């Protein structure tokens, strides 16, 4: 395993990856690196190191692609038995029977990536068989510039719902100039395409990504899909602690997008990280009226957390209204 630093740690809070990146597909279907949120092109060959076969001394949250999950079942069983949490990315065919049985609730989480067809995306892997094994299963919705972008996002959320997802994680797709030039050259034709050129090279991609994230949230709320990771839990961090922390991290990001330099998102992020480090059950702390024992839970953060975790109340309702406003 290797340590990783995700491009969007508020959306994908994992610390390690098992095995190398997957190779680019030969059938034309795009392959995603969810750590950098980039399409996989040429993958440098890396020789396995001794550390790739060692079990961490303390449980960690590990990202596993479908191919090594299929190939390394015995090692995954050792990881699970040692209390590590797994996020398995379904970027290749994988039978639910190839995954180890979780030792506790929320230890193994499945993510099926969705990309717009414009960027080479294929269908979402069916998730029903994983949910039948009581594994949390959802979709990583990759948001990139495409013709009719809002319609594309709604289509992706609808496909996730039809595939049996119980949650959706919407994340911007990184499309550096070489990727945009590649897709333009393949779609513009000999005479060029002014509308496509404007989309790929003269659009504020950061602003577009924010609008797509907000549209994804509207679609999820319409279909009743959760919007943050419910795990993975580890033997040190229960599922409920991770899920509550992930929800605060998500809203920290959204506040940053809405408010810019004046954002109070850092307060939620600090409290979320402290809650995760504490390993305390937030429901038990709320029942005891003792949430303030966790560093960073100021009166505003406590009020926001309580209302966000319950789904309604102030100040969460006000932030939610701004986020989903048309």
Image: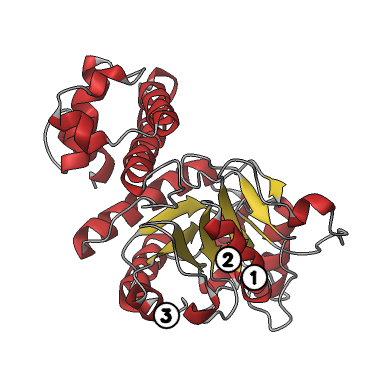
Q: CA distance from mark 2 to mark 3?
A: 23 Å
Image quadrant of residue 103?
bottom left
Residue 266 screen position, x and y as percent: 41, 23
In the displayed structure image, the side of residue 215 where residue 24 appears, left or right: right
Q: Position of residue 111 (x, y in %)?
A: 47, 64
Image position of 142 with respect to 158: above or below: above
Q: Is residue 144 visible?
A: no
Q: Give 28 or 250, whichever is nearer the viewer.
A: 250
**In the rendering, which numbered label is found on residue 74?**
1
Q: Is residue 241 visible?
A: yes
* Marks 2 and 3, the one that precedes in the sequence: 2
Q: How many marks?
A: 3
Instruction: Report the residue at 35% width, 57% height from top.
Output: 105
Residue contact at pointers 2 and 3, CB within 8 angstroms: no
Q: Quadrant of residue 247?
A: top left
Residue 117: percent from left, percent from top? 53, 74
The residues bearing labels 1 and 2 have C-alpha atoms spaced at a distance of 5 Å
Distance, label 1 to label 3, CA atoms, is 24 Å
Q: Decide: marks 1, 2 in contact (CB < 8 A)? A: yes
Task: Give the class, few, some or many, for how many residues have Cα within 10 Å of label 1's Cα (few <14, many ≥20).
Answer: few
**Tag 2: Cα neighbours inside 10 Å, few (<14), some, or many (≥20)?**
some
- Residue at the disc numbered 3: 126
- Residue under label 2, please give it: 77
Dot 2: element = helix
Identify which residue, 87 or 134, lies in the foreground: 134
Crowding at mark 3 (Cα within 10 Å: few <14, some 14-19, many 20+):
some
Whether 48 is drawn above or below 98: the answer is above
In this rendering, the answer to whether 262 lies above or below 256 is above
């Amino acid at each position: 395993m290797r340590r990783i630093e995700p491009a969007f740690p508020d959306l994908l809070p994992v610390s390690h990856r098992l095995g190398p990146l997957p190779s680019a597909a030969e059938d034309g279907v795009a392959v995603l690196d969810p750590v950098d949120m980039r399409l996989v092109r040429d993958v440098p060959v890396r020789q396995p190191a001794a550390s790739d076969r060692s079990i961490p001394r303390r449980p960690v949250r590990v990202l596993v692609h479908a191919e090594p999950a299929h190939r390394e079942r015995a090692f995954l069983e050792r990881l699970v038995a040692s209390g590590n949490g797994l996020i398995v990315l379904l970027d290749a065919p994988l039978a639910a029977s190839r995954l180890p049985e979780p030792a506790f609730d929320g230890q193994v989480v499945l993510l099926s990536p969705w990309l717009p067809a414009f960027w080479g995306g294929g269908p979402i892997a069916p998730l029903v068989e994983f949910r039948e094994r009581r594994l949390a299963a959802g979709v990583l919705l990759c948001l990139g510039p495409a013709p009719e972008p809002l319609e594309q996002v709604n289509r992706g959320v609808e496909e996730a719902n039809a595939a049996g997802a119980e949650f959706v994680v919407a994340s911007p797709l990184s499309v550096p100039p070489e990727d945009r030039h590649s897709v333009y050259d393949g779609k513009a034709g000999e005479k060029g395409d002014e509308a496509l050129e404007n989309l790929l090279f003269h659009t504020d991609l950061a602003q577009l990504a924010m609008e797509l994230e907000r549209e994804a949230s509207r679609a999820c709320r319409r279909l009743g899909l959760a919007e943050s990771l419910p795990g993975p839990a580890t033997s040190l961090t229960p599922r409920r602690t991770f899920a509550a922390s992930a929800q605060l991290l998500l809203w920290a990001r959204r506040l940053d997008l809405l408010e810019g330099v004046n954002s109070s998102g850092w307060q939620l992020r600090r409290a979320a990280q402290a809650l995760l480090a504490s390993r305390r059950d937030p429901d038990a702390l709320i029942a005891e009226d003792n949430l303030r024992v966790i560093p960073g839970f100021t009166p505003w953060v406590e009020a926001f957390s309580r209302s966000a975790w319950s789904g309604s109340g102030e100040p969460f309702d006000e932030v939610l209204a701004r986020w989903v406003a048309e």
